[in-house]
């Protein structure tokens, strides 16, 4: 049986001269127009931008929460099957003579720093502590929040959010790009991954659209990462210097002020632009190696002075629990619970209450951030004698949906929006690796490191709260301040100052690594896969990225419910949805390419 050669004649029209020489005008201009429009909207009408983004995001989550959850579950299982099958796992990303460009140490440190570096600094203590207070097991009433019994489920979901699924998202994009770039010698750009389905149409409007979606998702994904990191950077600088203008003045739980966030953003992005113009061979590689060394020092600090035995116990128990629940967490999606469905599920005596009281009870019973005790205390007077537990149980579906949409789906959208950046970056540094090596090396190895990091740092924070030493101070701290609050409970004096300064430097280098990698990736997409792009365009996209983050921070802080990252997160989830659809088609394309290439090899 003969089979025709694959389509590889990808021709991305580029400007022959002028300012955009070597760049695709449609991709560059459409991407810039979208981002500039978002910046102008957020700066001129910040309140409107914040409210509209929030409303659109809420509607999308109501309709697409299950799509996000199931898609990511399929991504993870698909990659494991590819790696385990001998025919696909042994395929090399390149020719038989191609050798890896980077050593294993540099390869691992680069993927670690670019993929989850800032997230691991911000959420190392915040994620386990937060999930210790609220997760699906707690919402179902099986265990009490912030109890010894809740620790295992807290780590089950911590591992879910920072484990195999997260890295599977990156690797699916990266593997798709690397396969076509190194085995078919096609441009290292997003549309290449869809050529088995699009064919010649990839040279036209559809190809441009796919690349634009990749650029927009990259900008928004990197923006959220840098936003959280900049906030933690401000917390660290404040802990070292005590400069009051960096914070909002709240004595009990100070938060970074808008002025502090914007000032720190300008510093970080200025450094990242300088690093980006040096290219991947110098700036990112050296910063990544520095990140890894400083990360090891921080980890050893927690090993020596933290609750290491408690952490290792939780690591073992949490890993087993995570694997046992892997399938259920991969595909267990929840839908929203309507007010009518809730009203039909509550006891008959509660159904007879006034409509306004039923509506109030519905809002409280379906809130994923409350508790049975808080719900009981907040019942209206007309329901004081009713069975509060039965009424609260009727709202479990709503709580589970609200929690999943606000936590797991947020993470899936974040990692998906981040995946064009990380995936393309992983593809750039993985030439010469086998498919099996790429999948296991970029999914399992970094996930295990994330698990260890989260249990050693986060386990110490939980243990300090469990034994009463922290007295609620860690739970009460803001997410970006929890790491520094934990360090203050562990160590003191000059050593505390030194470690805090080191953390500030580590956060800064992680931020710079993420930002300059993102700038390079955006330029790679817009130049049709070229790895050496013009310095002026790196600078311009660095400035655009800065403007997007700054404008959305300002918009998020507008309105009654001010949240500097609210608008950023909403924009990111909205922007991630189209690229999730692109990733589904990437997976289908890769199946087709691998199958047909295997047939070609048999008949060669």
Image (cartoon, helix red, strand yellow):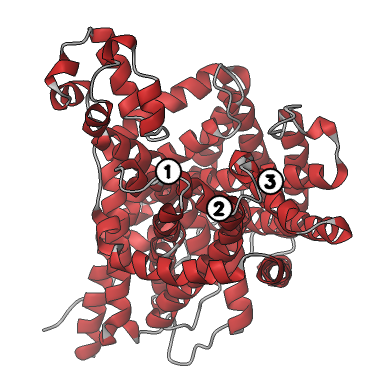
Label 1 Cα crowd, 10 Å radius (few <14 / some 14-19 / many 20+) = many
Front of the two marks 2 and 3: 2
Question: Residue 169 or 340: which is nearer the viewer?
Answer: 340
CB-based contact (under 8 Å), mark 2 and mark 3: no
Q: Check disc 1 and report its element: helix, strand or loop.
A: loop
Question: Residue 143 or 542: which is nearer the viewer?
Answer: 143
Q: Which residue is mark 3?
A: 232
Label 3 Cα crowd, 10 Å radius (few <14 / some 14-19 / many 20+) = many
98 to 247, vertically: above or below? below
Q: Check disc 2 and report its element: helix, strand or loop.
A: helix
Residue drawn at the location 68% of the way across and 42% of the way down: 231
31 to 197, vertically: above or below? above
From the top left corner, tell me how far across and down residue 397 is, in percent: 24, 37
Q: Which residue is mark 2?
A: 466
Q: Check disc 3 and report its element: helix, strand or loop.
A: helix
From the top left corner, tell me how far across and down residue 329 is, in percent: 30, 56
Residue drawn at the location 29% of the way across and 33% of the way down: 62
Residue drawn at the location 46% of the way across and 66% of the way down: 187
Q: Which mark is residue 134?
A: 1
**Cα–Cα gap, marks 1 and 3:** 22 Å
């Amino acid at each position: 049986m003969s089979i025709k050669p694959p389509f590889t004649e990808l021709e991305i029209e580029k400007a022959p001269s002028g300012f955009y020489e070597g760049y695709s005008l449609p991709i560059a201009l459409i991407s810039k127009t979208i981002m500039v429009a978002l910046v102008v909207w957020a700066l001129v009408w910040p309140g409107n931008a914040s409210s509209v983004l929030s409303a659109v995001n809420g509607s999308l989550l109501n309709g697409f929460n299950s799509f996000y959850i199931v898609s990511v579950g399929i991504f993870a299982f698909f990659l494991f099957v590819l790696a385990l099958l001998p025919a696909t796992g042994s395929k090399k990303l390149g020719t038989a003579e191609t050798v890896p460009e980077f050593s294993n140490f540099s390869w691992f440190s680069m993927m670690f720093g670019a993929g989850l570096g800032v997230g691991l600094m911000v959420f190392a203590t915040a994620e386990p502590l937060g999930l210790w207070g609220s997760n699906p097991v707690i919402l179902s009433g099986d265990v009490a929040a912030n109890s010894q019994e809740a620790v295992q489920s807290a780590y089950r979901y911590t591992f879910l959010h920072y484990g195999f699924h997260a890295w599977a998202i990156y690797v699916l994009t990266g593997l798709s790009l690397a396969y076509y770039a190194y085995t078919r010698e096609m441009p290292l750009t997003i549309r290449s991954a869809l050529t088995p389905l699009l064919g010649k149409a990839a040279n036209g409007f559809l190809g441009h659209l796919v690349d634009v979606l990749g650029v927009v998702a990259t900008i928004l994904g990197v923006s959220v990462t840098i936003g959280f990191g900049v906030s933690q950077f401000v917390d660290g600088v404040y802990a070292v210097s005590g400069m009051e203008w960096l914070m909002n003045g709240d004595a009990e739980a100070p938060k970074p002020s808008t002025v502090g966030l914007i000032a720190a953003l300008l510093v970080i992005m200025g450094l990242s632009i300088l690093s980006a113009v040096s290219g991947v061979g110098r700036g990112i590689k050296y910063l990544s190696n520095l990140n890894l060394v400083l990360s090891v020092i921080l980890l050893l600090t927690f090993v020596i002075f933290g609750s290491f035995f408690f952490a290792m116990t939780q690591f073992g128990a949490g890993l087993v629990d995570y694997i046992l629940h892997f399938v259920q967490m991969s595909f267990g999606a929840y839908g929203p619970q309507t007010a009518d469905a809730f009203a039909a599920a509550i006891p008959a005596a509660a159904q007879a209450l006034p409509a306004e009281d039923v509506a109030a009870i519905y809002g409280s019973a379906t809130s994923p951030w409350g508790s049975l005790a808080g719900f009981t205390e907040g019942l209206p007077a007309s329901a004081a004698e009713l069975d509060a537990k039965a009424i609260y149980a009727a709202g479990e579906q709503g709580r589970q949906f609200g929690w999943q949409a606000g936590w797991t789906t947020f993470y899936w959208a974040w990692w998906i929006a981040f995946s064009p950046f990380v995936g393309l970056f992983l593809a750039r540094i993985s030439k010469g690796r086998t498919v099996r090596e790429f999948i296991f090396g970029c999914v399992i190895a970094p996930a295990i490191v994330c698990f260890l990091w989260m249990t050693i740092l986060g386990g110490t924070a939980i243990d300090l709260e469990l034994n009463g030493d922290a007295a609620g101070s860690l739970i009460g701290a803001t997410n970006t301040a929890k790491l520094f609050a934990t360090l203050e409970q562990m160590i003191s004096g000059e050593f505390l100052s030194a470690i805090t300064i080191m953390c500030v430097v580590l956060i800064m280098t992680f931020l710079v690594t993420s930002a300059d990698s993102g700038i390079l990736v955006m330029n790679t997409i817009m130049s049709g896969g070229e790895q050496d792009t013009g310095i002026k365009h790196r600078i311009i996209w660095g400035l655009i990225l800065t403007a997007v983050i700054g404008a959305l921070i300002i918009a998020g802080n507008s309105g009654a419910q001010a949240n500097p990252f609210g608008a950023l997160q909403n924009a990111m989830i909205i922007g991630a949805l189209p690229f999730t659809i692109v990733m589904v088609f990437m997976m289908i394309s890769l199946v087709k390419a691998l199958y047909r290439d295997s047939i070609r090899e048999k008949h060669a």
